[in-house]
Image: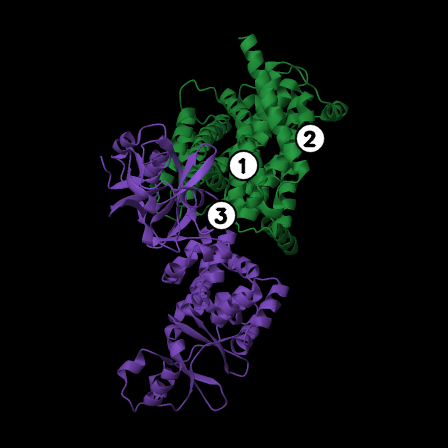
Chain colours: A purple, B green
Amino acid sequence: MAETFLYFTDLLGLPVYDLKQRRIGRVRDAALVPLIHPARIDRYLVGAGPSWLSVRYDQISTISLDGIQLSNEKLYPYHSDEYMLRIQRDLLDQQIIDVNGRKVVRVTDISLEVTRADRESLMILEVDVGMRSILRRLLQGVVPPRWVRRIQRPISPNSIRWEFCNIVEADPLRRLRLNISNDKLERLHPADLADIVEELGPAEREAIFETMDSEVAAEALSEIDPKMQASILEALEPEVAADIVEEMSPDEAAHALSELEEETTAGILEEMETEPLSDVKELLEYDEGTAGGMMNTEAIVLPEDTTLSSAMLSLREHEDLLENTHVLFLANLAGQITAAVPLARLFLADGGSRLRDLATDPLISTKVDEKQNRVTELFDKYNLLALPVVDDDGSLAGVITADDVISVLRQR
Amino acid sequence: MKELFSRFRKHILIFLAVLGPGFITAVVDNDSGGIYTYSQAGARWLYLPLWTLLPITVALIVTQEMCSRMGAVTGKGLSDLIREEFGLRVTFLIMILLVFLNLTNIMAEFAGVATSLDLFGVSKFISVPIAAIVVWFVAVKGNYQSVEKIFLFACVIYVAYVIAGVLVKPDWKEAMIYSVRPRLMLDSGYIAMLIAMVGTTIAPWMQFYLQAAVVEKGITAKEYRESRIEVIVGCIMTSVIAFFIIVACAGAYRDHPTDIQSAKEAALAFKPFGEYAFILFSAGLFNASIFAACILPLSTAYSVCEGLGFESGVNRRWREAPVFYWLYTLLIVVGAGIVLFPGFSMVQMILLSQLLNGMLLPVILIFMLVLINRTSLMKEWINPRAYNVVAWATVAVVIGMTLALTGITIRNPQ
């Protein structure tokens, strides 16, 4: 009877027969060679006496629960090969990332599809987790595979398709040899990525941040618990850490750096480029419990007499800031902030109107040394999305946005 | 006055700030099982068992330090490591063992609640179900973090044991001599009590709990040194309290050593406090029991789900983590349910649970020892030789005592 799929627990221990129907041994492990094919089982490691033989996928004619039939007898002894991802050793019982379900899971078993062309070979179909696969593992080798399939039937399966699995490998050299990338992770929402990273061990965590695109890494890092942020940044090379910190918004960067030891902070600051550096350095000066410690320095400030059409022009120039901008600020000639204009009002006004007339009155602002508590009160009382923070001379020092307030409240 | 208050507040804040996983674990160590085991040790054998405290403390420090080191270096819990290094079958067996042991402990905690309130005439059919419901809600719906601080602060009540130990005017000379003079007897009761003392002090569940707590707190190998001090201080404190519980009970029972059968008898340790004796004992036991009852089922559910790869965490909903919630609920329901059986002899069962913990401790210790000596896992942080010697000696001694106990029991069936 030919099966359309096999579990890895079935495959382990299957007898292997040569051309003359002699049993040469049993399957002890199987391996992918990801550089050649991402899902096909490329090698079968067969225990024959004390040593292991390595059988390539194209030396096999049929695979079923009754055994593996070889089509070729030129077998080589197995010697450790760095390009192999061994299922039993490297995958089973280890943690992988389920990109689709956005969580870390532990591999209990693997479902393999039997594909039939001129020969039969196995493709990894799914990674199995949950009760059903646990039962299989417990009964493996004790109860015949066909019985196990019958027993497990009432339990609903819980699997992750192989293409949604992201393997975590801490060793950079091995990652290269096994062709493991974090492409799939980079497509996740940074907040989900942050949750996943928090669940991993420190070595895996650092490996992910080291290899990921620094922009994605920065966004994810901003979402991580401050204490863990610090331990990640400390573990990274200063250049890598600096690349990531540069991509963070200045207030998030300052937050993260303030948790570090002074020496590490200095090391990272040294590696940073000048432009974000000055902002971050400035923010680091403020006490964390004050408005200065909550704000970020990225804001769009326009002259008081700006018209709508010229405002639109300068918005185009600041495209990178738009995602987090809800309010524009107007300043007089002395540089003092005089008005705040909600971005949404620009859509309804006609081209010739002056921004001054679109402002919300009166202007609500706060000083850099204002207490955190007071700031959250202001947000609550005036239903703010953004609050300008001014220096003693009335010029804009930074802006606190609603998400900063939510972070502060959540941390209590 | 105001100044005094603010100074007092500052002290409390400092106290709360230094609290870490090691300290909390040490405090929870003196739970209902601990209190009864030490009380029984003192009441039945007077100062004889005091000598065990020194070696037990050393073993406790070593095992706790090993767990927190493994947590800090690998960033993984003990059940995670067992799964990754030994595979599913071994993990499954260990988890069954852990669930069984922790069930006996949870039962002991609810029995502690029942006996402490029984002193005031509250029936166990009222106290235990209410306690079970409260415990369930505190972890799942409530804010455990703040409740934990209340529990910890209430543990100051243990100081009463120190005072009682002094007021009861024990024979200090004898106490000191027996603290350093080992006394071995091939008496099944005596050996069982020694195993129970090991089991209650170095409880298997603590190894899982402490390592998970270290990981949870994000302590890394680099910051680990500070954490080690906290672990050591916590362990010593645990043993000091154990010492005074034994001394207080030995003082109270010096003329007629007996087996403790009820809370009333254990409360005699507080005799010097006169009419307040029951209140003190009851409050201390109640706090310790309910504190541990909050931690144990949750910690068990986390360990099992992590080891077997089920979703876990109170921030997930029931539908997302069904195994976690069902296991958690069942542990509480069964643990509390056993106590409600008519004719359930509380104190004997509590002592028995600690004996089981002691007898099965070597299994967990052996796995820890294998793990912590793997260079692939621990790199330069593998166990120093002295630690290995102490931990293996603990394993050997406990197995030896268990064999001796079994031998004696088979030879002279009662």
**Residue B301 sits in which quadrant?**
top left
Residue for point 58% across, 32% down = B202
Label of residue B206 in the image? 1
Q: How crowded is mark 3: few (under 14 residues within 10 Å), some or many (20 or more)?
A: few
Residue matched to label 3: B145
Question: Disc 1 on helix, strand or loop?
Answer: helix
Residue matched to label 2: B54
Lateral position of residue B220 relative to residue A155, left or right: right
Q: Which of marks 3 and 1 is in front?
A: 1
As displayed, is residue A155 above or below residue A200? above
Calculate the distance from the C-alpha at mark 1 to the C-alpha at mark 2. Answer: 19 Å
Specify the subunit that label 1 lies on.
B
Q: What residue type is labelled 3?
A: Gln
Calculate the distance from the C-alpha at mark 3 to the C-alpha at mark 1. Answer: 19 Å
Q: Nearer the viewer, mark 3 or mark 2?
A: 2
Q: Nearer the viewer, residue A200 or A251?
A: A200
Lateral position of residue A366 relative to residue A184, left or right: right
Horizontal and vertical percent for residue A44? 38, 42
Lateral position of residue B340 relative to residue B13, left or right: left
